[in-house]
Image: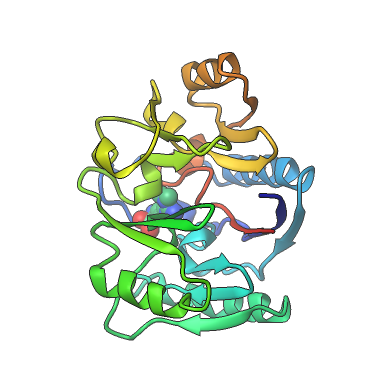
Amino acid sequence: MKLLKALVRRPSPQHQNGLLTHLTRSETDPDLALAQWEDYCDILRDHAEVIEVEPAPEYADSVYIEDTAFVYGNTAVMTKLRYPSRQPEHAAVEETLKGLGLEIKRLADWSYLEGGDILKFDDTIWVGLSTRSDLEGVQWLEKALADYAPTVIPVPVQHALHLKSAITALPDGTFLAHPKYAPPESYFPGYRRAPEFEGSQVVLLGDNKVLLSASAPETADMLKADGFDVYTTPMTEFEKTEGCVTCLSIRIRQ
Ligand SMILES: CN(C)C(=N)NCCC[C@H](N)C(=O)O
């Protein structure tokens, strides 16, 4: 599937105060974070139209735009962020998606679902049941996308923040996972093991091209040897607040 557009959001100067679930806090460098974000956007720009959503400097985690919405076909589903500190992030993203002509759908107020838990490949969507997303969220996502009737598979996530923290899809329809943190293999067809945790997080750039963190050189070598076109980019400042390459964009594909 071709990558058409990617929405991104500039990191907040308060990015280092972002939520942490599994890591202990370590200092991040705001200038380096901005430089890494710009490098990431440059790579996306070579493959798609990159659209910058109005920055939200007051919200520490706003750079993790993936969590706020999920686009499928002509529909943008506004997710339901679990923590109040992140909930105001939705508004400007919704405005931008509306401006692109997408039909906006919402979930029930009592449900929770974050974009990092939504993993799509072709007509199937795997949804992580993590500390951030629940079964109500999965059911409302299914309702919102009823016109497309995708196959929706809830998957337990126990050891990672989001589903896509530990498993993502490759262009050939196999999955790249870190066995210690990813959900059981039985949920996914064709499971490859990423040698590094950060290596299990990839963004598909179109054709055979994949983008992953420079923190995962062994995974990059493995994917190259398996015939993928591999792009890497430094992500250290985002990894310190449990972010990764997928979290920094909302991808719109054809
Ligand atoms: C796939 N992943 C990990 C994401 N889509 N989001 C990361 C959010 C990190 C943020 N500090 C938080 O805890 O919300």
Q: Residue at x 46, y 65 (%)?
A: 150
From where the camera sits, is residue 27 visible?
Answer: no
Q: Residue at x 48, y 76 (%)?
A: 78
Residue 127 lies, with reference to residue 243, above or below; the image says below
Query: Looking at the rendering, which quadrant does residue 99 occupy?
Result: bottom right
Q: Residue at x 35, y 49 (%)?
A: 163
Residue 12 lies, with reference to residue 225, above or below; the image says below
Query: Looking at the rendering, which quadrant does residue 198 occupy?
Result: top left
**Nearest to the observer: residue 124 or residue 245:** 124
Q: How far from the left and from the top, in percent, is residue 24?
A: 27, 42
Q: How is the image coloured?
A: rainbow
Q: Is residue 99 left or right of residue 78?
A: right
**Nearest to the observer: residue 5 or residue 121:** 121
Q: How far from the left and from the top, in percent, is residue 187?
A: 29, 44
Q: Is residue 168 left or right of residue 180?
A: right
Q: Quadrant of the C terminus?
A: bottom right
Query: Looking at the rendering, which quadrant does residue 46 occupy?
Result: top right
Q: Residue at x 48, y 24 (%)?
A: 216
Q: Is residue 130 left or right of residue 44?
A: left
Q: Residue furthest bottom?
A: 109
Q: Is residue 167 left or right of residue 23?
A: right
